[in-house]
Amino acid sequence: GRGAVGFMDSHAARRLMAGGAHARREWWTDEHAQEVAFQALAGAYGAIALVALVQLFRIQFRVPEYGWTTQKVFHLLNFVCAGVRAGVFSVRRSLDNIRPEVVADVLMDVPGLLFFTTYTLLVLFWAEIYHQARSLPTGGLRPTFVAVNSLVYVFQGALWVWSGTEPHERGTLHKVSSLFLATVCCFAAAGFVLYGGRLFAMLRRFPIESKGRRKKLREVGCVTVVCTTCFVARAGMVAYSVFREKSGALDVMNHPVRNIVYYAACEIVPSALVLFILRKLPPRTPPAPRAEDGSQYHNIS
């Protein structure tokens, strides 16, 4: 009767809902969706690497007489970091089959360390400008930069070696590595707040109003906001993934959207914005003055 029909309808509805939920679950684990996500990330990183490389060549052609300036090294590191990411994501599905497993960890972690080095180099550059403008000593800035980065690489390298020799501890060591990355990101964000804020305040107090000053003010302010936000977001997302491993795990094969959101928010979008903001080339070096016989004078330095 009607009761039987009602029962059948409700049963069919439950089966339909269950089928829909199953289909949604199937979407997350669909190999095609995963492959599309990884190739999209590889393409985005490849574009970042290409932009950084083109900008590096443009700077070199503009001022070929200078060596490896901070600006050139910054773009080179951006190119290497994004290039390695592009290569890794293009073969991401096969990484989980690599043995020993620690090799996959190294391939996934090294670009993150390079990203840290790239953007702390920018902090160093700003710190040197600020210290020179305020007649403060600058001798300890570069050794501090080298020491901090060396400590980061040595500590992470020790975790890789430990994981390689004790594979059963890999899960625990991965959590330690993630918490270490979150801490490192907090220090990077603090560096941008400290020296980006100081440089911004100093430029605002600069007495001469000019177009160049306003552009530099916007440049420092925008890069500070972008980089601080990116490192704070990364620290929060990585820490959350450690304590909520099932619901918040990052860089997992069966959640392509989570991969895209994490890497886009923490590396791709910030890199693209910073490269765009810092796109201006250095001024050309004026030619050396000529003597009456046509030969050029050269400064002794």
Image (cartoon, grey):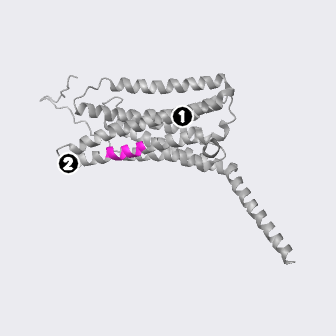
Query: For this rendering, which residue is in front, 47 or 170?
Result: 170
| Image quadrant occupied by the C terminus | top left
Question: In this rendering, would 203 be left or right of 12?
Answer: left
Q: Which residue is mark 1?
A: 179
Q: In the image, what residue type sits under mark 2?
A: Ser
Counting every numbered tag in the picture gives 2
Q: Nearer the viewer, mark 2 or mark 1?
A: 1
The residue positioned farthest toward the front in the image shown:
3
Q: Which residue is mark 2?
A: 210
- Which is more N-terminal, label 1 or label 2? 1
Query: Is 225 one of the magenta-colored residues?
Result: yes
Residue 75 visible in this rendered orientation of the protein? no
Q: Residues within 10 Å of mark 2 (few under 14, many from 20)?
A: few
Question: In this rendering, would 19 be left or right of 110?
Answer: right
Q: What is the x, y in percent for residue 5?
A: 84, 74
Q: In the image, what residue type sits under mark 1?
A: Leu
Q: What is the x, y in percent for residue 245?
A: 62, 41
Among the 4 quarters of the image, the one containing residue 253: top right
SS state under label 2: loop
